[in-house]
Image (cartoon, rainbow, N blue to C red):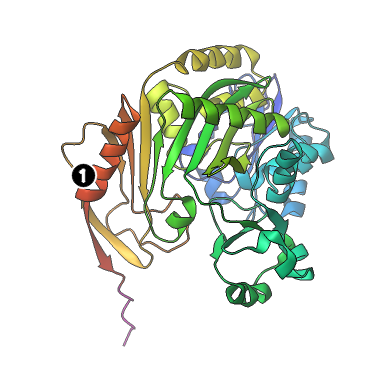
Amino acid sequence: MTTNCTFPGNRIVVLNRWSDGFAAYHRYIDHAANSVAYVCTPHGSAALDASQIAHVEELSDILDEDALHRAVGACQAALGGIDRLIALSEFDLLTAARLRSSFNIHGDLPDTVVRFRDKTVMKHTVAAAGLRVPRFAPLEDVALAEVESMHVMRFPIIVKPRTGAATIGVRRIDTRARLDMLWPTLPLVEYECEEYIEGPVYHVDGFLLNGSLVIARASRYINTRLQFAQGKPLGSVMLDPGPLNDALLEFSEACLRALALRNGPFHLEIIGGCDGFYFLEVGARVGEGEIPFLFHELYGVDLFDLWVTHQSDDATRFDAQAQAAFIASTSSTRGGFLMLPAPAGKVFVDAKLPHGIPALYEAVFPGTRHFFDGAGGYGNILARFRYRGASEDEIAAAIRATLRNFRYTLAECMAPALAE
């Protein structure tokens, strides 16, 4: 634990699980004008800009909610109270809501956040508003029922953690026999299943203020996030203005109204079924992967900055940023991304950037001799590419060209020799 002098302004506690550039909260919070404390792991603590931080609590496990509660209590004592609590990782949103409730802190509380973390709750809420959702059920309900009589059990089905993220733990189940094999391997109360809907998958990302879109972009996936977890590339292309784009934005706004999200960022996924749009799921947070980079690099809009500034009650700064984002929302520039999954158990040697693809403006590779440990997610992957152009077709063509022409070298991971 480290403690420095405190400052005037709001007393803010940040839950930080990141140890990279995402931990640079000093970009968003004026540490001279506010008293700012952090709760984080030792690696997360090392990533902070230590100047003008009022207090730091280090935890070996930020998922230990009892220890986290004690750490926030220590921050409260050090700051003389807490006015705002900020958490940006999807895995921390519900925990942060419970902490706000326990410590009487302004902001989103559990009954709000659960609609954006528990996939059965969010689907119930959207369906109650008369919007299409896949047929679904908590897995424990399916286990206790006559599954043959349940419409949701028409195969294939998707089984996923109710509060999961980044497709971790998501499975497609094609047969009853495979489902029967799965039962004993899962904590049923933590999972749900839903019917598989055939059709293109879209995502809509943006920011809401008082229930209205400040900025939003609708995109279509190339492959799906589940396929990415299974080893296939994942791409995304922003849609051109037109009827499809407008319909997706309209459907998204209806879903967000049903869920009573009025302020903050969102990442919403939609399936284009044969009979119309289906709500898939939503997060009340900034989209993962390349999405925040695209908004920043194409439109000058830092969604994290908007989110933190709004949460920390910096009204003057937020109003200026929101106005700039609204103006940027009219831009005709389109973008997209491509992510190549990690080849688990391999070592990265080198890569050659494809030439002659004007829309490709950024490529990120691992360092030489990087080992892919197969942990999953979007952080430790083979390559990521970002694109900027004038149209949806230009971006899609650039992604296809990258997939054709990208070359890289991998090596086998050699076990260390045993000492004689």
Q: Closer to the camera, 50 or 228? A: 228
Q: Which residues are magenta?
A: 414-420
On screen, residue 328 versus residue 107, left or right, reads left
Q: Closer to the camera, 386 or 400? A: 400
Q: Residue at x 33, y 76 (%)?
A: 415
Q: Residue at x 68, y 19 (%)?
A: 210
Q: Is residue 26 above or below residue 187?
A: above
418 within the magenta span: yes
Q: Work out which quarter of the rendered image holds the C terminus and state it.
A: bottom left
**Residue 96 in view of the camera:** no
Q: Residue at x 43, y 63 (%)?
A: 374
Amino acid type at circle 1 is Leu
Question: Few, some or many C-alpha atoms within 10 Å of disc 1 (few <14, some 14-19, many ≥20)?
Answer: some
Q: Is residue 331 above or below residue 290?
A: above
Q: Work out which quarter of the rendered image holds the N terminus and state it.
A: top right
Q: Is residue 228 above or below residue 214?
A: below
Residue 176, given in percent of the width and then of the height, sits at 61, 73
Q: Main secondary structure of the magenta part?
A: loop
Which residue position holds label 1? 353
